[in-house]
Image (cartoon, helix red, strand yellow):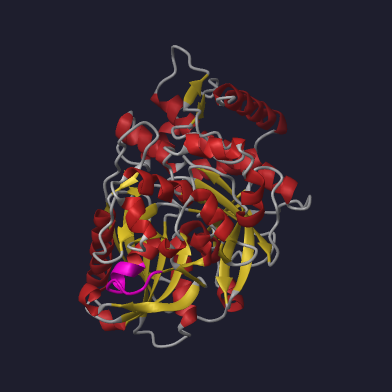
Amino acid sequence: MINSNKYILSIDQGTTSSRGILFDANYKIVAIGQKEFTQFFPNSGWVEHDPEEIWLSVLESCNDAILRAKIKPSQIASIGITNQRETTVVWDKETGKPIYNAIVWQDRRTSDECQSLQELGHQEIVSKKTGLLIDPYFCATKIAWILDNVDGARDKANSGKLIFGTIDSFILWRLSNNKVHSTDATNASRTLLYNIYEGCWDDELLKLFNIPKSMLPNVCDSAADFSKCDDSFFGSEIPICSLIGDQHSALVGQACFEPGMVKSTYGTGCFVLINTGDKPVESRNRLLTTIAFQINNKPCYALEGSIFVAGAAVQWLRDDLKFIESAEQSETLAMQADPNQEVYLVPAFVGLGAPYWDPDCRGALYGLTRSTGAAEITKAALESVCYQTFDLLAAILKDWSGNELSIIRVDGGMAASNWTMQMLSDLLNLPVDRPKNLETTALGAAYLAGMQIGFYPPIEDFAKSWKSENQFNSTMPEAVRQKKLSGWKDSVSRTLSNK
């Protein structure tokens, strides 16, 4: 490591807020700036963001962090960017202006189109090239929707005047003063357009989804010399040295570098990834095969299960039901619930993700009685995240060569809840390890950005720095566990759309 007067700026652009986080040479957080932005829901199942508002929130949060840290911008050695994945932006190459709102990863507007593509028999070729399912979750049908629904967009795209990017790519374009149109392999692997086996945009998939190749960014390693940030934004010209999707970044931040290591991140959604090494594992249980990270042109692969609603269920309790005033209060309220009531929330607000992949079902509560109140529903909301994690790990175990898992590393906002993490360990019947630094998503991008310039050491040394803050171990009797899991399974079966 070098100069203790230098820092790494991690831009953590999430689904509900943007954050600028400064890390020192020992991976410790020096300052955090955060700015929430507006969520738009124009129709049922639609979710949008204003890209300009996201851009301003990035600038504000980063400048706030620099101000709080009381450092000079010239002390920032490099910038790493991690982002909400699959969220899709199309903008004008000449003006740099988006032609439509960002269509968020949660958005389900293209479910009918995806259903049609599946019925036409395209799923097999898509899976064999991308490791993904044909689902509204990913970018391809979002891009096509924008091109087909914004006046003149398809003609402009065909003439090379429009470009596409996930949020990392859009921020890089802006920070480079509209000069660099790039992304990394992890974000590219979430588009339905990138061949993860050959490491390139796939012409056959571009034709299938009717998307011009000229729209797509250059694909680089997750740690690379992407560009330099224009000095007009933070007061200094700073190298931008990592781009990586948020869940992949958390895998790096959790130091899950060995095959078989698992992390689960609890943010707006929940995402479980298992490192499968240098060879992709094809899922037989409706999980996703994805690029975990790519360094020195060598991809490392992962299996992933995605839950669309985790922390979003707590936001629902707070903002819509008004049961709590802050997310932290959910744990206290859940502990007050009547233990004799078995209430189940299936939080399919925007459909269900893995392993069900049902975009058309919607949320439901089961087991309500006359005495069911805020505490019982809050408990059910927290438990729903644990049940969904169980479903993902069960599927992962079937795909991962029959190997048993020994432990799971957790991070994200909900991981701070002791009650929820204990319930998770009880239902999984596995130790749950919570690190000292819960900001693993931001840390992953920061580490890669620092490693790229020699500020941080190689992967092996970084892995040794990982420390556990608390380990939760199962104490639930097996009969109780099985009864609760059976009730969950029944609730999900009643909720699925059965299309």
**Which of the two residues, 158 or 7, is positioned nearer the viewer here?**
158
Residue visible at 44% across and 72% down in the picture: 242
The range drawn in magenta is 172-181
Whether residue 361 is visible here, answered yes or no, is yes
Q: Where is residue 447 in the image (x, y as percent from the top left)?
A: 47, 73
Task: Kindly give the residue lying farthest to the right in the view shown.
Answer: 402
Q: Position of residue 394 (x, y in %)?
A: 68, 42
Residue visible at 41% across and 32% down in the picture: 333
Quadrant of residue 386 in the image? top right
| Horizontal side of residue 188 vs 484, given as left or right | left
**Which of the two residues, 65 or 416, is positioned nearer the viewer here?**
65
Residue visible at 33% across and 33% down in the picture: 43
Whether residue 322 is visible here, answered yes or no, is no
Position of 46 relative to 55 (above/below): above
Q: Where is residue 408 in the image (x, y as percent from the top left)?
A: 62, 53
Position of 200 relative to 270 (above/below): below
Task: Kindly give the residue lying farthest to the bottom in the view shown.
Answer: 3
Q: Position of residue 132 (x, y in %)?
A: 59, 50
**Which of the two residues, 280 or 28, is positioned nearer the viewer here?**
280
Residue visible at 46% across and 25% down in the picture: 376
* Magenta segment main secondary structure: loop
Quadrant of residue 425 in the image? top right
**Which of the two residues, 459 or 177, is positioned nearer the viewer here?**
177
Magenta includes 178? yes
**Quadrant of the image for the C terminus?**
top right
